[in-house]
């Protein structure tokens, strides 16, 4: 999947995501904004809706891109955190292996969640 297709899918799925719906028109919270192209951003990073495995697509794009190299899980997460965020972020092993979430962690936004 190329970046344009990924971003088009993210934009197309914002209207069906409950968190995105709540913040698309929210002008009171300065952490949330909408850019000129319509993408929802949290602290300047693109919000990825929980639809159509878009979180997995972001992970795969960042991990598999020829320019990103393969420097391990932490480097991949750092690359993702620079540009993207989602509220219920699964772990890389959960995304890649389809493991059943069982332990606590934090999302790219720093919020706690159970995996």
Image (tube, rainbow, N blue to C red):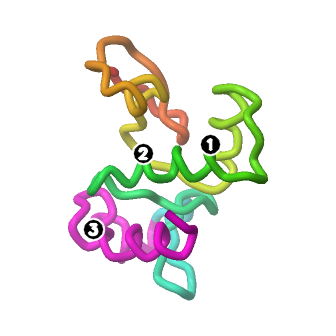
- Write down the quadrant of residue 28 in the picture: bottom left
| Location of residue 74 in the rendering, given as x and y in whole percent from the top left corner | 68, 27
Q: Disc number at residue 18?
A: none
What percent of the width, then of the height, locates residue 78? 70, 38
Q: CA distance from mark 1 to mark 2?
A: 10 Å
Q: Which residue is mark 1?
A: 63
Res 56 label: 2
In the image, taking residue 10 as reference, residue 62 lies left or right, namely right
Q: Nearer the viewer, residue 8 or 41?
A: 8
Question: Which portion, as a residue range, is magenta?
Answer: 1-28
Can you identify the residue that label 3 sits on? 21
Furthest-front residue in view? 66
Looking at the image, which residue is at 49% across and 71% down?
7
Q: Please report whichever mark, 3 or 1, sits nearer to the chain's N-terminal start.
A: 3
- The x, y position of residue 5, in whole percent, is 47, 73
- Comparing 50 with 31, the one in front is 50
Q: Nearer the viewer, residue 11 or 3?
A: 3
Q: Which one is in front in this view, the residue at disc 3 or the one at disc 1?
A: 1
Judged by depth in the image, the label closer to the viewer, 2 or 3, is 2
């Amino acid at each position: 999947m190329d970046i344009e297709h990924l971003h088009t899918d993210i934009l197309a799925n914002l209207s069906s995501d409950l968190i995105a719906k709540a913040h698309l028109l929210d002008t009171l919270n300065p952490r949330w904004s909408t850019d000129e192209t319509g993408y929802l951003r949290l602290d300047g990073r693109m919000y990825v809706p929980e639809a159509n495995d878009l979180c997995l697509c972001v992970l795969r794009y960042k991990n598999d891109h020829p320019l990103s190299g393969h420097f391990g899980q932490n480097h991949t997460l750092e690359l993702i955190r620079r540009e993207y965020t989602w509220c219920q972020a699964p772990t890389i092993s959960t995304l890649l292996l389809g493991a059943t979430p069982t332990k606590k962690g934090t999302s790219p936004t720093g919020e706690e969640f159970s995996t």
